[in-house]
Amino acid sequence: MRKLAPLFLVVILLLTTSIYPVNADDWYQSEPDHFTVYLPDGTVLFKIGMRVYVDDEYISQDNKKYRIIKVDVSDKTAIAEFVEDVELPDVSDISFNSYIPTLAQNENRTIGIYCTHSDESYLPSDGSASIRANGGILDVAKKLGEEFENRGVKTVVNTTPHDPHDAGAYRRSRRTAFKIIKDHSPAALFDVHRDSVPKEEYITRLNGKEITRIRIVVGRSNQNREVNESFAYRIKAVADKRYPGLIKDIFMGKGNYNQELHPRSLLLEFGTYNHMKERALRATSFFAEVADIALFGGTVRNEETRQKEKVPQLAKENTGAGKGILFLFLFVIFGGGAFFFLSYGKEEAWEKIQAAKNLVLAIKESIASLFRK
């Protein structure tokens, strides 16, 4: 193992000095618009207010995976083929009645929330689909934060605007996301949006309340994809058990949506532009409970022993990677610090270090999961 140590150091150094481009949704329309994705037989599979690309993937509400195989940008249409049925984490034995006391024992219970597209609004309630720097989506983000706080989860809601709503929005919001991570070390990070598809795609009733369903978006173009995707699956698994229909679907798009900065970072679409904002506000309570359980509490069944086991405390896995990893990073950071700050400047250098750290954490978690199987 000692002979491999230099190799590990070189790998980490290369990862730390890698350049992570902000590759996100660059399709922007002055008015709400969307792509329609069809099955080969002409049946509409889903609609989405962002550009789709070949090899993008989609998990439907009934947990079937599809892959985009053809895109017509001029017509804003695409064709997807069925890939496989998706097996979500088994949460059939989660103890929903006792999860709150379980959470009280967890020390790192912080959530970060921000809005890349801070202009997004709900036309019937806000009077416009877009309000520069003060969109109705900020109200949804604040309400989501309140719902987490009501459950004893510390929440940081950053309402910094990132206008205009263009291809540069994700680059601007990257600094906001990084600041939340740097200052608060959240267990998870949520970028709150609203979609631009017809309202029929989202509106529903849950527990007698008129709400909007929620779409989860995971970026394909970042090293945290596997961990973020697993987190999305976990949230959907809990939601399907607790509040069936709350999570509309999961879309794995070409961009990275700044998700390489944190191993549990998701983009959330709280409904769409042409329904009442109150539907989205009401949905925040259900989502906060689901994410709360998925992150911090409950019990699940071990399929081998058929015994109940405590759900892993995901936040603890995010706060550190052990003394060995810490030592290696301290070595890399101090050894290469001069290069970073001379080459990139203080803020960008810290962003790269954070992204590299989360890459190694994601790799460590993926390797650990292999041994748990």
Image (cartoon, grey):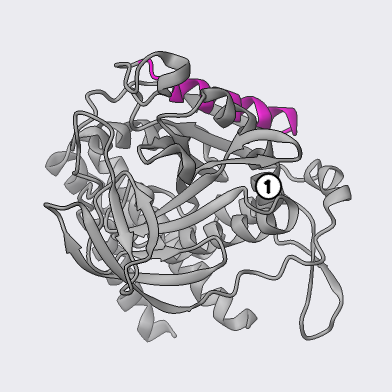
Position of the N terminus by quadrant: bottom left
- Tell me what residue is drawn at x 48 percent, y 48 percent: 215
Q: Outermost residue toward the front?
A: 42
Count of numbered circles in the view: 1
**In the rendered view, does 192 fall on the left or right side of 343?**
right
- Tell me what residue is drawn at x 37 percent, y 60 percent: 44
Q: Amino acid at mark 1?
A: Val
Give the secondary structure at mark 1. helix
| Towards the viewer: 278 or 232 | 278
Q: Residues within 10 Å of mark 1 (few under 14, many from 20)?
A: many
- Tell me what residue is drawn at x 30 percent, y 54 percent: 36
Q: Which residue is mark 1?
A: 290
Magenta stretch: dominant secondary structure: helix
Q: Looking at the rendering, which quadrant does residue 161 occupy?
A: top left
| Towards the viewer: 306 or 213 | 213
Residue 87 position in % (x across, y down) = 59, 75
| Towards the viewer: 331 or 302 | 302
Position of the C terminus by quadrant: bottom right
Q: Which residues are magenta?
A: 134-152
- Tell me what residue is drawn at x 58 percent, y 29 percent: 279
Can you see residue 222? no
**In the rendered view, does 211 fall on the left or right side of 79?**
right
